[in-house]
């Protein structure tokens, strides 16, 4: 999952980037409001974490412009301002959830996972595709109840395919969603990654639809 983090507090942003990365997310970080607006307009993020107090352009204006432009990725708003009127304004402008500073990173992760699941139409904390189960809290994948030993990048692949189990995912889309913007990789990197995960999950669990991409299936070959 690729996340846009918009936060101008350097210390907080570094901590969030580190913790989000450890939780299995690829993170693009932006501190400037206008640059953040542009990135959200041109990139297909799985979610955004948006601070309201930003230089150049405030977070509420960014939120409104994204929604007016049809950008529908889920957005978790972070702010030091905790009055109820501002929370209502943020939700009505299109925020999916709201968290006041200071906060615990565990709550950020829980709320972020929840809004991503809801956006995919999957409310349960464990995503199930046939005999494959993806537990976002434990960053664990099981097949028929047996745990599969995956690297963080391999887990991201399975998680993204599970969130989008209803459609085929192209190599270029996986490249966009599994890696941060500064990663110097090609679709060949995705092909190698898929090959490794196929061997670990077992035959038939990741199928190729020629000309369309990869689909996660719950049963073997």
Image: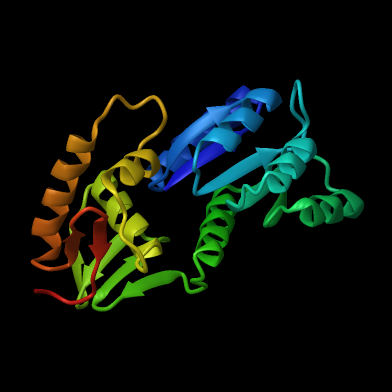
Residue found at x 38% / y 70%:
127
Residue found at x 13% / y 58%:
198
**Whole-percent x, y for residue 40 in the image:** 59, 36
Residue 80 located left or right of residue 206: right
| Above or below for 122 versus 75 | below
Q: Residue furthest right?
A: 85
| Above or below for 91 versus 66 | below
**Whole-percent x, y for residue 71 in the image:** 62, 47
Q: Residue furthest front?
A: 211
Q: Residue 158's image quarter? A: bottom left
Q: Residue 84's image quarter? A: bottom right
Query: Quarter of the image containing the C terminus?
Result: bottom left
In this rendering, does residue 108 appear at all? Answer: yes
Residue 78 located left or right of residue 139: right
| Above or below for 181 versus 175 | above
In this rendering, does residue 139 appear at all? Answer: no
Residue 168 located left or right of residue 117: left
Residue 82 located left or right of residue 120: right
Q: How many marks?
A: 0
Residue found at x 59% / y 57%:
111
Residue found at x 59% / y 36%:
41
Colour setup of the view: rainbow
Q: Residue 97's image quarter? A: bottom right
**Whole-percent x, y for residue 22 in the image:** 39, 43
């Amino acid at each position: 999952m690729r996340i846009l983090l918009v936060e101008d507090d350097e210390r907080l942003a570094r901590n969030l980037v580190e913790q989000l990365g450890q939780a299995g997310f690829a993170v693009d970080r932006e501190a400037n409001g206008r640059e953040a607006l542009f990135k959200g307009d041109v990139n297909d993020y799985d979610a955004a974490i948006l601070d309201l107090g930003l230089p150049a352009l405030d977070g509420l204006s960014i939120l409104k412009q994204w929604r007016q432009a049809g950008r529908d990725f889920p957005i978790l708003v972070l702010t030091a301002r905790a009055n109820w009127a501002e929370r209502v304004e943020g939700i009505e402008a299109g925020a999916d959830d709201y968290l006041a500073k200071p906060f615990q990173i565990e709550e950020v992760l829980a709320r972020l996972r929840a809004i991503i699941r809801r956006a995919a139409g999957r409310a349960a904390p464990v995503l199930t595709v046939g005999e494959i189960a993806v537990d976002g809290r434990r960053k664990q994948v099981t097949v028929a109840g047996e745990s599969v030993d995956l690297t963080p990048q391999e887990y991201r692949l399975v998680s993204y395919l599970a969130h989008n189990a209803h459609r085929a995912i192209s190599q270029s889309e996986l490249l966009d969603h599994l890696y941060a913007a500064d990663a110097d990789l090609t679709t060949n990197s995705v092909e190698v990654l898929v090959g490794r995960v196929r061997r670990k999950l077992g035959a038939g669990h990741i199928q190729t639809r020629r000309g369309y991409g990869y689909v996660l299936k719950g049963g073997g070959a």
